[in-house]
Amino acid sequence: MTTTIRLLLVDDDPLVRAGLSLMLGGADDVRIVGEAADGAEVEALADRTRPDVVLMDIRMPVVDGLTATERLRARADAPQVVVLTTFHADEQVLRALRAGAAGFVLKDTPPAEILDAVRRVAAGDPVLSPVVTRQLMAHAAGVAADTRHARARERLAELGDREREVVVRVGRGMSNAEIAGELFMSVATVKSHVSRILARLGLNNRVQIALLAYDGGLLDGDGDRAGDG
């Protein structure tokens, strides 16, 4: 039996909401449970509608999507959040991902791809490629990057060697099955490692693991040696 994905739409443009509702509501496995015109409405609406996924505009006049995402993801029963944006590389998108959003889609993305993103996120998969992550990190590079690098190295030092190896592969965008094949583990063991990494480092999802890998320089040539020295 197909599980129905409960979807909440958040965008200050009524035409965008209507278009998304028309595009996504026609899918057999998606049910639009609510619509909001501003981030200020999101928490109360989420309480009433219990969405699995929130499609969140990042720029809204009263409470923006970044703040709304941070508030939602801080909850114990947090739904997954996919950010809607008009820019590929944007500081606010990166902050939303750091706050726990599972990925982002551009507003001009074809309907089928937006639907695929909703389905993937509902299934626990991030909607973010390593290439896009690099673009975002490059966009945000600067003085603050040095501070993030040092902090990330400290956090990564808490992990064991095998866990750091898994972090590297997650940062490269590999699936659990691909990681299992490369590291000669079972898929169940990889899932267990990922769960422990999330719990130990207080992270929300694989996107945040990937961002930590980039911040800590795990993918810059020093590979699995993060935390040494």
Image: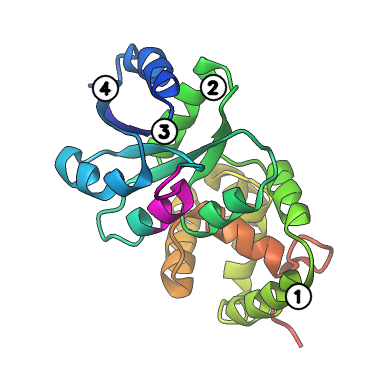
The answer for how far apart the CA atoms under marks 4 and 3 are is 31 Å
Q: Nearer the viewer, mark 3 or mark 2?
A: 3
Q: Which residues are magenta?
A: 61-70
**Crowding near the residue tagged with mark 4, few <14, some 14–19, many ≥20 C-alpha atoms within 10 Å:** few
Q: Looking at the picture, which amino acid does disc 4 mark?
A: Thr
SS assignment at label 4: loop
From the image, which quarter does the N terminus lie in? top left
> Residue 113 shows which numbered tag?
2
What is the C-alpha distance between the residues marked 4 and 1?
A: 46 Å
Q: Which mark is residue 146?
A: 1
Give the side of residue 180 with respect to residue 219, left or right.
left
Task: Tell me which numbered mark, 3 or 2, is placed earlier along the sequence.
Answer: 3
Where residue 57 appears, as percent x and y from the top left, is 47, 38
Q: Is residue 48 above or below residue 134?
A: above
Q: Is residue 147 above or below residue 68?
A: below
Earlier-in-chain disc, 4 versus 3: 4
Rounded to the nearest whole Å, what is the CA distance between mark 4 and mark 2? 19 Å
In the image, what residue type sits under mark 3?
Answer: Asp
Image quarter of residue 123: top left
Assess whether mark 1 and mark 4 are in contact (beta carbons under 8 angstroms). no
Q: Position of residue 120 (x, y in %)?
A: 45, 33
Magenta stretch: includes residue 178: no
Q: Nearer the viewer, mark 4 or mark 1?
A: 1
User: Tag on residue 2?
Assistant: 4
**Residue at image mark 3:** 12
Quick check: 157 left or right of 191? Answer: right
